[in-house]
Image: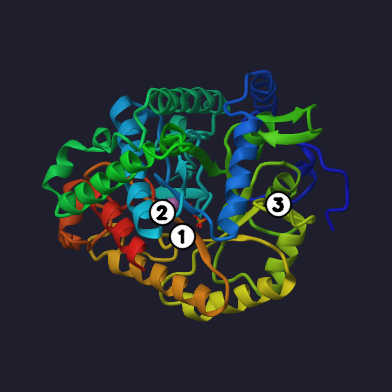
Amino acid sequence: MNKKAWSPHSWKSQPIIQQPVYPSEHAVEHVVHELTNMPPLVTHFEVNTLRQALAEAQQGKRFLLQGGDCAESFTDCHTDNITNKLKILLQMSLILLHGMKKPIIRVGRVAGQYAKPRSADTETRGDITLPSYRGDLINEPAFTEESRTPNPQNMLRGYNYSAATLNHIRALVNGGFADLHHPEYWQLDFAKHSSHANDYENIASNIRSTLELLSIIPGIDTSELARVNLYTSHEALLLPYEQALTRHLAEDDKWYNLSTHFPWIGMRTGQLDGAHIEYMRGIANPVAIKIGPSVSGDALLRIIEVLNPTNEPGKLTLIHRMGHHAVAEKLPPLIEQVNRSGYQVLWSCDPMHGNTQTTANQYKTRRFEDILSELKQSFTIHRQLGSHLGGVHLELTGDNVTECTGGARGLTDDDLHHAYKSPVDPRLNYEQALEIAMLIAKI
Ligand code: PEP
Ligand code: CO
């Protein structure tokens, strides 16, 4: 199993699912060739720094906060959207830093989260059946033949939108926007009215005073301490795209996926002998895999052996997403098996994807209390088994949407229509995201 030589395209010899059917394979090859010659979006230095930080998170010295949209869209690539996403992640990380007393690794589902797995290959409306919408990297959501036909040019557009997004994030971060000395920059306009505004202000001013205090101690460089950065991540689903952005680095003779710092394998494409695991086993990036309730302990161990055969620190993150009803039953056997194996992993919890439901008025939603319940149970289970939960993976936005119910403002099913914007899964809105960070910090 998987003993053959790896190459960026060796995934093609394995069974593959969740891929579009393009009208012309030749056109796909053409685009892949073009992308192969484009500059990478991230550097292997950043990727390696992230892997080291994740290794420290495995030891409990750091905590991983990963979050963003279920699916980014090309039309949402504008200043406010990017800035608000950065702001909410920075605010949440400040709350977690303050509560957990450890550095936070910030990772956005951003600058490339454009490809989505779907439960069906096609969608039928009336007597018309068309390919499902699979994310902007592949096709368009409008229900017309032209929009839904997978277009390889979208890979080039996705590359360009990712580059524009990342460019703006880097400009903000390098320009001092993300400096811990100035958390006031991160205030969102509507946040003043939030019931959490005071708590957040207190935390921010506490951190400011701590930095001021530290700055008078000789030998401590608070400008280093206060510098904050953001890594990118996305589901590595569309393998021709991922392959095209894979680069060989002569320095360490390794292959890196330089479209993102931290790619993950989705729950639906985690088959041991499948193309996605084959692709991911050969890259030097830290990688994550989503683990759902149907994965057995034995299957998980075999996946770990393939993805991280040398047990390299920081290499592998397991993101469990069981649902609040199933987590108490499904998670413990997995943790016990991994504990016994001696493999080092970073455990993270995605409390979103196991808790999706459809309301009577046909909105796809998630209940805040279910999300919190899965998180609380997960922290406890890990603690009881001598393991620890070192990260969270959330779908959220810095905008004032109404997609998940509950939270301090008590959104109900009847409120969902006010500002339901997600084309795919429901996200925590600004206030709910802030609230969940405050609650995590207290667990
Ligand atoms: C997602 O993260 O948007 C997703 C599809 O998750 P999962 O693979 O866990 O279902
Ligand atoms: Co999702």
Viewer-nearest of labels 3 and 1? 1
Residue nearest the viewer, comparing 367 with 168:
168
Type of the residue with mark 2: Leu
Q: Earlier in the sequence, mark 2 or mark 1?
A: 1
Quadrant of res 340: bottom right
In the rendered picture of this protein, how many numbered marks are placed on residues?
A: 3
Q: What residue is shown with label 1?
A: 350
Could you tell me residue 354's position as x and y percent?
A: 44, 65
Left or right, 345 with reference to 96: right
Type of the residue with mark 3: Ile
Q: What residue is shown with label 2?
A: 394
Mark 1 Cα shell of 10 Å, populated few (<14), some (14-19), many (≥20): many
Quadrant showing the N terminus: bottom right
From the viewer's perspective, is residue 433 above or below residue 324?
above
Left or right, 362 with reference to 319: left
Could you tell me residue 280's position as x and y percent?
A: 70, 46
Question: Regarding mark 3 in the picture, which secondary structure is present there?
Answer: helix
Scheme of colours in the image: rainbow
Could you tell me residue 174's position as x and y percent?
A: 43, 24
Residue nearest the viewer, comparing 270 with 436:
436
Real-space Cα separation, disc 3 to disc 1, in angstroms: 20 Å
Residue under the image location 57 percent in, 76 percent down: 386
Q: Are marks 2 and 1 in contact (CB under 8 Å)?
A: yes
Q: What residue is shown with label 3?
A: 277
Q: Earlier in the sequence, mark 3 or mark 1?
A: 3
Type of the residue with mark 1: Asp
Residue under the image location 32 percent in, 31 percent down: 83
Whether disc 1's CB lies below 8 Å from ligand 1 is answered yes
From the viewer's perspective, is residue 276 above or below residue 261?
below
